[in-house]
Image: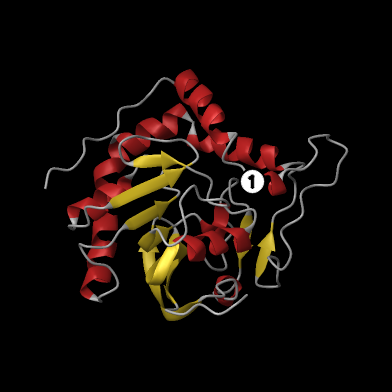
Amino acid sequence: MTLPEKPLLKPFLLLLSLSLLLLLPLVDPSFRRSSSPSTTPAAPAAGAATPLLRIRPGYHSYDDYIKHQLNKTLDPRLRRLWATRDWDRKVLVFARFFSDLKSQGLLSNASRALCIGARLGQEVAALHRVGVADAVGMDLVPSPPLVAAGDFHAQPFPDASFDFEFSNVFDHALYPDRFVAEIERTLRPGGVAVLHVALHRRGDKYSANDLFAVDGVLGLFKQSDLVRVSKVDGFGLDTEVVLRKKKRPSQR
C-alpha cells in the first residue's frame, strides 16, 4: 500500500483563518460561556471532577479554552517539527503500538479507525503502515488528507461510525465526561477504545485536566467494559487503557 505523503507545512495565517472558520460550527453551544473577564471561569461538566481527576481552572469561556489549544496546534515551529524530524519516529512508535493491538485481536485490517487529536496525522499514517486502510484523524485544525477538522467534545461523526478509536490527548479535555461520551457514541457495539494517559504527572501548560489514578478515567466509561490496563512508553504518557463498547449498551 502506498502511504499518503507527509503533509506540507501551510502558512501560519492561512491555517489560523481556516481553523477559526471551520471551528465555529463545530463547537457545541452548550459549552459556551460569557467571554467577559469578570465572569466565573467555566466549570467542568457535572460529574467530571473527582478526587482522581482534577479539572484545571482559569478559562473564562469555552472560546478561551479553544484559543489556548490553537496556540499549540498552530505554532509554526511545532508544526515544522511534527512534519519533519518527529514524523518518522512517531509513525514508527505508533505502528508498534498498533501492531501489538492487532496481535491481541483488538484491531484488524478491516477496522474503521479514528485517531483523536491527531495533529498532522502520524497516528493515521501508522495505521496505514500496519494495514488498516480505513483510518482518519481528527483535530481542531485539519491536515488533509489524513486529518479532518473536529472538536473531541462534540465529534462531527454519526453514531456508531468506528470500530476502533485511539487518543493520547485525554489530558487536553476540559470536559472529560463529554470526551468519553463522544467516544462511546461514535464507537460501534463491540468497538475498541484505546487511551494513552499519564498518571501522577502534571502535563504541560496545554493540559486541561490532571489524572491521578486510572479509575479517574475508567469511571467515565458507562457503556464499555475494561479489557486491560498496562504500562506503555508513549511520548511522556505511561499508561495504556483498553476498553470495549458493550454489544448491548445499558441505559444511562
Image coloring type: secondary structure
Image side of residue 31 versus residue 137, left or right: right
Q: Which x, y percent locates residue 84?
A: 29, 34
Nearer the observer, 161 or 104: 161
Q: Is residue 188 above or below residue 227?
A: above
Label 1, residues with CA under 10 Å away: few <14, some 14-19, many ≥20: few
Q: Quadrant of residue 251?
A: bottom right
Q: Which x, y percent locates residue 141?
A: 47, 35
Nearer the observer, 13 or 113: 113
Image side of residue 80 versus residue 216, left or right: left
Q: Quadrant of residue 32?
A: top right
Residue 83 appears in the rendering: yes
At 52% from the left and 22% from the top, the residue drawn is 17
Q: Residue furthest right?
A: 38
Position of the C terminus, as image quadrant, is: bottom right
Numbered circles on residues, count: 1
Q: Which x, y percent locates residue 175?
A: 64, 56
Image side of residue 90 versus residue 2, left or right: right
At 25% from the left and 35% from the top, the residue drawn is 6
At 22% from the left and 65% from the top, the residue drawn is 99
Q: Is residue 242 above or below residue 201?
A: below
Residue 92 appears in the rendering: no
Q: Which residue is mark 1?
A: 28
Give SS at disc 1.
Answer: loop
The amino acid type found where label 1 is placed reads: Asp
At 44% from the left and 27% from the top, the residue drawn is 76
Q: Is residue 70 above or below residue 248?
A: above
Q: Quadrant of residue 228?
A: bottom left
Q: Which x, y percent locates residue 116?
A: 44, 52
